[in-house]
Image (cartoon, rainbow, N blue to C red):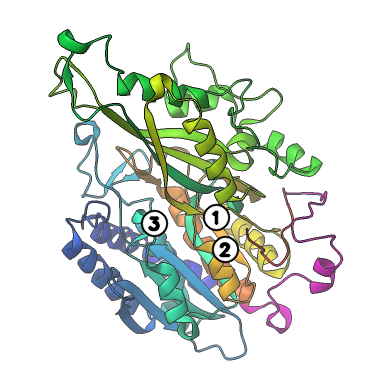
């Protein structure tokens, strides 16, 4: 371990340079215009894998998918195998004028590394490979086996990932899953994410006529589709902090007393969130009474209008518009059924439409929620590794976002523990201008992964899962129990809706 950690210190500048090579490639997957760059990033990732010492490095595909970079080191017979996941595609730049440095040039400023993809998720690629290289380059071997997969379609919903997993199951099969694509609760404070919200979308369209009509001729006579749409969407405005959709909260799993107690100990309050999100002083947080902000964003459902369109402002004309549309995104939590929740939303949006306009609501896709109990040998190994790497006790936290493949991959690997370790922090601004990665946290995560490999390799008899007897003693797959210490909420066996 001493030699491996020393290697990291000696090669710190090299690892940052490797991240710079990846950030320099605009591997945007969301616009369909950067296929060549995505191929290039996969190839550079493979080069970095070979340099780190991984073997059987190659690019893989499934059907028409973007390339996956894959590498492995299986020289520790009898030891557990760790599956490392990251992704090499990124979001568009957006609002380029707001960037304080070139988005495709890794730039260090006040202890942070700026660039598109620096945090989400190219920093994770380099951190994982840094830990691999620390062992292989310093000692010639790893304490455990490693398989690493870097995807190129995560930002577009990982459309081909499930098929890829099933197609390459035997090659990928591992004992522990490590994903570095989540956030830490704060800079310098490590976190393991044990719950993820799911998400589903709905395309809402309102139509009142076949064509637009001059507003001088028909204004006040014809139904305004844009006004009708906004009247319909206004039904979703929260009251008392809760979305007004009948039945929407009926199946929401309640937090345990221990979880609520843990939330209150985590850093974060209204003043902090106002500063981080740039909230105007007059704007209130629409929280239910006695609901903590983290509970709202981690374990309560939410409805957001993420797009709305009736006519271009630039090309606006005095017309009564015949149609308008919007995309509504809904975050769901344990134990909500996405199909049932969609029907509940649809019923609210289509009931008694203003002016009798035609309203259609169609699903646009969904990802399931996921939750596990952060307990057992693999989680203890991770908590210990994070404490050593960061010099601070790790917290088990939830996340408001979705990583749809985690649950199915856990099932595919026979219930393998999934360790979701933070790479971002509240200042990272992923998907937004001036995306950045805290340099100190980058180093600490890399060191933590180096410790994690040793901890996993030293587990007695290679046992990574929690005691199955404890799981069998529960009253059901979603039965919550009160626990002490870090926040926990059971879902033994990783059962999914």
* Residue on which the image places disc 1: 368
Q: Position of residue 143 (x, y in %)?
A: 56, 80
For mark 1, give the secondary structure: loop
Residue 110 x, y percent position in the rendering: 35, 38
- The residue sitting at 44% across, 26% down in the picture is 233
Q: Distance from label 2 to label 1 (Cα)?
A: 8 Å
- Give me the C-alpha separation between circle 2 and circle 3: 15 Å
Q: Which residues are magenta?
A: 457-486
CB atoms at circles 2 and 3 under 8 Å apart? no
Which image quadrant for residue 144? bottom right
Residue drawn at x 32%, y 52% is: 117
Residue 309 seen in the figure: no
Image point (51%, 73%), residue name: 83
On residue 450, the disc is: none
What kind of element bears circle 2? helix
Question: Which residue is tagged 2?
Answer: 407
Q: Determine crowd level at label 1: few under 14, some 14-19, many 20+ residues with C-alpha closer than 10 A.
A: many
Label 2 neighbour load within 10 Å: few <14, some 14-19, many 20+: many
Q: Quadrant of the N terminus?
A: bottom right
């Amino acid at each position: 371990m001493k030699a491996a950690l020393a290697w990291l210190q000696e090669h710190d500048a090299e690892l940052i340079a490797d991240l710079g090579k990846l950030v320099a490639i605009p591997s945007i997957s969301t616009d369909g215009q950067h296929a060549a760059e995505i191929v290039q990033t996969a190839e550079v990732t493979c080069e970095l894998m070979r340099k780190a010492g991984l073997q059987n490095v190659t690019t893989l595909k499934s059907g028409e998918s973007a390339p996956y970079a894959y590498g492995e080191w299986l020289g520790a017979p009898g030891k557990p195998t760790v599956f490392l996941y990251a992704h090499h595609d990124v979001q568009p730049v957006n609002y380029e004028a707001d960037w304080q440095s070139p988005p495709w040039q890794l730039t260090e400023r006040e202890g942070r590394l700026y660039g598109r993809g620096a945090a989400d998720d190219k920093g994770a690629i380099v951190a994982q490979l840094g830990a691999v290289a620390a062992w292989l380059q310093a000692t010639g071997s790893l304490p455990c086996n490693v398989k690493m997969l870097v995807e190129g379609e995560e930002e577009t919903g990982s459309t081909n990932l499930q098929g890829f997993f099933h197609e390459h199951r035997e090659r990928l099969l591992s004992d522990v899953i490590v994903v570095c694509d989540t956030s830490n609760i704060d800079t310098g404070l490590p976190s393991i994410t044990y719950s993820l919200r799911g998400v589903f979308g709905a395309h809402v369209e309102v139509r009142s006529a076949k064509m637009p009509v001059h507003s001088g001729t028909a204004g006040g006579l014809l139904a305004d589709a844009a006004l009708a749409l906004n009247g319909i969407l206004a039904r979703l405005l929260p009251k008392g902090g809760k979305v007004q959709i009948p039945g929407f909260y009926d199946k929401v799993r309640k937090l345990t007393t221990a979880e609520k107690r843990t939330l209150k100990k985590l850093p974060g309050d209204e003043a902090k969130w106002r500063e981080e999100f740039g909230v105007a002083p007059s704007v209130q947080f629409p929280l239910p009474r006695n609901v903590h902000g983290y509970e709202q964003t981690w374990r309560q459902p939410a409805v957001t209008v993420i797009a709305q369109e009736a006519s271009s402002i630039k090309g606006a004309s005095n017309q009564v518009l015949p149609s308008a549309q919007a995309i509504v995104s809904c975050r769901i939590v344990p134990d909500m059924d996405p199909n049932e929740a969609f029907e509940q939303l649809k019923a609210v949006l289509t009931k008694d439409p203003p002016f009798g306009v035609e309203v259609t609501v169609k699903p646009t896709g969904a990802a399931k929620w996921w939750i596990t109990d952060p307990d057992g040998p693999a989680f203890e190994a991770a908590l210990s590794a994070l404490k050593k790497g960061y010099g601070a006790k790790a917290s088990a936290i939830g996340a408001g976002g979705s990583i749809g493949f985690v649950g199915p991959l856990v099932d595919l690997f026979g219930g393998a523990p999934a360790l979701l370790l933070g790479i971002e922090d509240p200042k990272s601004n992923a998907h937004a201008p001036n995306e950045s990665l805290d340099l100190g946290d980058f180093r600490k995560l890399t060191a933590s992964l180096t410790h994690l490999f040793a901890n996993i390799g030293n587990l007695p008899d290679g046992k990574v899962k929690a005691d199955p007897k404890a799981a069998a003693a529960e009253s059901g797959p979603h039965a919550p129990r009160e626990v002490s210490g870090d926040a926990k909420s059971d879902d033994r066996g990783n059962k999914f809706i």
